[in-house]
Image (cartoon, coloured by chain):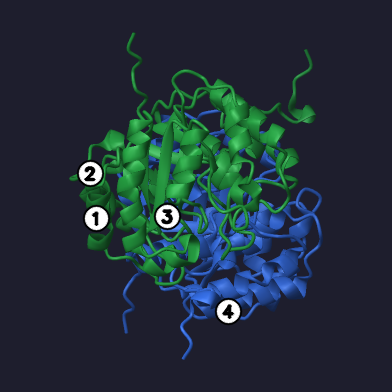
Chain colours: A green, B blue
Amino acid sequence: MRIALPDITIQEVAPRDGLQIEQEWVETSDKIRLINSLSAIGFSRIEVSSFVSPTVVPSLRDATEVFAGIARRPGTIYTALIPNRRGAELALTARADELNFVMSASEAHNRANMNMTHARSLASLAEIAKSAHEAGALVNATVATAFGCPFEGGQPLEKVLEIVRRYLNLGADGITLADTTGMANPKQVSQLVSETLKLIPADKLTLHFHNTRGLGLVNAMAAYDVGARRFDAALGGLGGCPFAPGATGNVCTEDFVNLCDEIGLTTGLELQRLIELSRWLPKLVGHEVSGQIAKAGRPLDLHPLPERLQSSA
Amino acid sequence: MRIALPDITIQEVAPRDGLQIEQEWVETSDKIRLINSLSAIGFSRIEVSSFVSPTVVPSLRDATEVFAGIARRPGTIYTALIPNRRGAELALTARADELNFVMSASEAHNRANMNMTHARSLASLAEIAKSAHEAGALVNATVATAFGCPFEGGQPLEKVLEIVRRYLNLGADGITLADTTGMANPKQVSQLVSETLKLIPADKLTLHFHNTRGLGLVNAMAAYDVGARRFDAALGGLGGCPFAPGATGNVCTEDFVNLCDEIGLTTGLELQRLIELSRWLPKLVGHEVSGQIAKAGRPLDLHPLPERLQSSA
């Protein structure tokens, strides 16, 4: 049986990119419950956790336990973010279906975030891809800060494209362009996505936008308009940026699904179930989250007239 | 001397649509200070207050005092929202440069919000336009709930266009299509704006979007793409919707200006000054506001590298 692809594929990253910045510890059992609930809603990909230094990202130090505890739905790819070979080994041992390798376009950001030069990051990717493929896993390679770096500023388009070419040559099965700190604008998105789609087909390219400056969905629409079809998003708009306290995080999954529903693009995801799950998040993380549709309801969830205007029966 | 029009004209509505929903009283002197600061930044239009029943909107019951207290910058049009003849009289007495007449496309919403039928609202507009023009004031006419009503749901396109035609016949100088409770989507926006621009030129049409479901800027871009050039927005994204507690309000002025700056569209407004003024708002209204750019900073406000990575001089 073949299942028709939706018009837009939304991949859920709340368990990883959403939770990684949370200051309060989220119990392993709650993380597993979140992921199992997301699986039940039918996401094709869920980024489960990351295998990075527990000193640097203590909130995800239970990655192995989370991978061991989740129920795996056939048809969902369970991804682990990894920065290096050591992370890749741990992720494969945990039976991740896909490794999401990350390097920043910006050298400064790659050193700050991964403590590695480009040369060292890229050298590790070839080996990571080999071990992953031997284990039957996929490798996605992410260009972080592809739309701008908080230390260096704008990143030249040709530099980002050259990294994409290197990734493909080194064995990446898929590519993500990530707007790590929410610096992208729709004009830049149109240009970079158009150029990248000359190198890889749309079903291999993911756009990962943050809503740090309120432009997450604007950028997603700009990417869609030039042919992008795969997007990361986080339930409730979880996530954030260390340089923007109080600002919003990832593009919000249910807000994005609502947008798609409203303009007639299929996602294969049921909005009402996302809203219900999202309404649990403030309890899970201990604070309000930035997603809007879970607060406002769907556009056509109508309200009763004020009583004074209701005709008596 | 002729001044070139900006690519996009952003009209500031925070003093009216932003403050009207606030529960805590904002002092008249603070309202005046806000409006004077907005004037100094150079907005071409500022919606100062509304002349409506003080029982229904107690937060704006000082409309006359606010109009009397502001310093009027030559080149700025100071607007008053009015629902009826009585409001129009008060607004003209207060020397409003423009009356913004409002009627909802939805009969149910018009009754709930204005306590009037369409017939009664429209009958008043002809007289309002006459008195305004005699006094040398402009009349803008707003179609509230043009993109959907929280009681009735979707509004037929032809019904909205018919109201626009009636408004023009009754003497309106400008038209606003308002997404009063944030129900619009970009597909619908493209259609309605395209059709409306067959009835009036772009410099007479304002789009008023709310960000209730996270789509404010997406809808603004969709409207721009089919020719709209005038938009309402509120500093800090002030405002809200009684049906969506905790949800965001109007499109945020400084987030919109940042978007325009980033894609090379002129607004004539200086982003840094807007950000500085917006950072005063949480103190003014006693709570956080939803605008993002005031929290995150401009995309190219760069950050220093972590100390461990800075080379010693």
Residue A205 point in image, percent of width and height: 31, 41
Badge 4: residue crowd in 10 Å (few <14, some 14–19, many ≥20): some
Q: Same chain, marks 3 and 1?
A: yes
Q: Amino acid at mark 1?
A: Leu
CA–CA distance between discs 2 and 1?
Answer: 10 Å
Front residue of this view, candidates A220 and A134: A134
Residue topped by disc 4: B72
**Do circles 4 and 2 both sit on a common chain?**
no
Q: Report if the CB atoms under discs 2 and 1 are less than 8 Å apart.
A: no
Amino acid carrying label 4: it is: Arg
Can the viewer see residue B151? no
Query: Which element is circle 3 on?
Result: loop
Q: In the figure, B137 relative to A219: above or below?
A: below
State the residue position of label 1. A161
Mark 3 or mark 1: whose residue is earlier in sequence? 1
Which amino acid is tagged 3? Answer: Asp
Between the C-alphas of marks 4 and 3, the distance is: 42 Å
Q: Chain of mark 1?
A: A
Q: Report whether mark 4 lies on the same chain as mark 3.
A: no
In the figure, residue B116 lies in which quadrant?
Answer: top right
Residue under the point 72% across and 47% down: A25
Q: Which residue is mark 3?
A: A179
Residue A293, percent from left and from top = 59, 37
Q: Secondary structure at mark 4?
A: loop
- Reading the image, the residue beneath label 2 is A197
Q: Do residues under tags 2 and 3 come within 8 Å of each other at their CB atoms? A: no
Is the Cβ of the residue at disc 3 closer than 8 Å to that at disc 1?
Answer: no
Figure quadrant of residue B188: top left
